[in-house]
Amino acid sequence: FGHATAVGIDRWIDWRVGHHGWTMNDAARATHDAGGLFFVAHPWSIGSPSCTGCRWLYHDVDMSLADGSEVWSNRWPRELSHNPCNLRFWYEQNAAGHPLTAIAAADFHAPQSWTHEIPVTHVFADELTVPAILDGLRRRRVMVSVGPWLELQPTASRWVLLENVLAGAPTRTNGVASWRDAPPGARLRLRRAGELLEETQVAEQGRLAFAAPAGPVHAELWSAAGDLLA
């Protein structure tokens, strides 16, 4: 009924869900107890009987135990690609109060598969160590891309002043999206809670300032053909 990855650990996690009452929730907790992160793998991949355990069908899993989800598996534009559904699943979980880290992976099983663009997960880490990389993943400081660079930086936030006391959250999310190595015709999309805030065609490189309602903002870079780039 699907599978997950236990990242950053040095011990075996029991994967035998259903054996002596062991559940996927137990596997997620065991991963965390071992100091690792629990990522749902390609939730909308083709399932049984073609690929047993590939599609995520665990409806009783506490998704607050998950640290991330694979939004991009293998190439985006390919026959029977379920990546758009993987991305939508990630947005739905975030909107439901489960802020998951978005990850990508090649998931190639044959040498000939490596002749195409490969989706890669870039992690912003304070140093090149396993704990620092895990911390970057845990804090969702990531970018997934097949080549172009896409980055979000916050700018000054506006706060509400009530009786000389600052409210507990900014009223707006202000930031700058920057990119480079975009192909001709590429389009930049800014989203909040999955809803499209802004879309514009962009040059090879550039910057775009934005102001949005308070909350997480995500950026996407798409090709003219409608394939995700970053």
Image: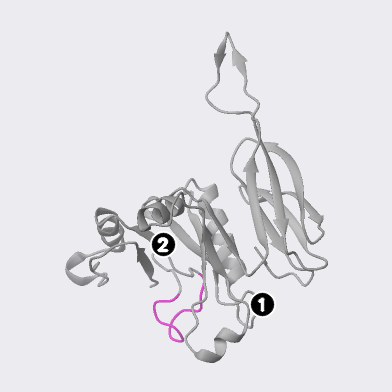
Quadrant of the frame with the N terminus? bottom left
Residue in the image at 79% along x and 69% along y? 224
In the image, residue 35 lies at what x, y percent?
28, 54
* Residue closer to the observer: 90 or 228: 228
**Splitting the image into 4 quarters, where does residue 116 fall?**
bottom right
Residue pointed to by mark 2: 39
- Give the overall secondary structure of the magenta segment: loop
Residue in the image at 72% along x and 59% along y? 180
Q: Evaluate whether residue 128 shows in this view.
A: yes
SS class of the residue under badge 2? strand
Residue pointed to by mark 1: 77
The extreme left residue here reads 20
Quadrant of the frame with the C terminus? bottom right
Residue 209 versus residue 204 in the image, above or below: above
- Look at the image and give the residue range highlighted in magenta: 44-54
Q: Amino acid at mark 2?
A: Phe
Q: Amino acid at mark 1?
A: Pro
Q: Earlier in the sequence, mark 2 or mark 1?
A: 2
Q: How far separated are the C-alphas under marks 2 and 1?
A: 23 Å
In the image, residue 73 lies at what x, y percent?
53, 73
In the image, residue 131 lies at what x, y percent?
36, 53
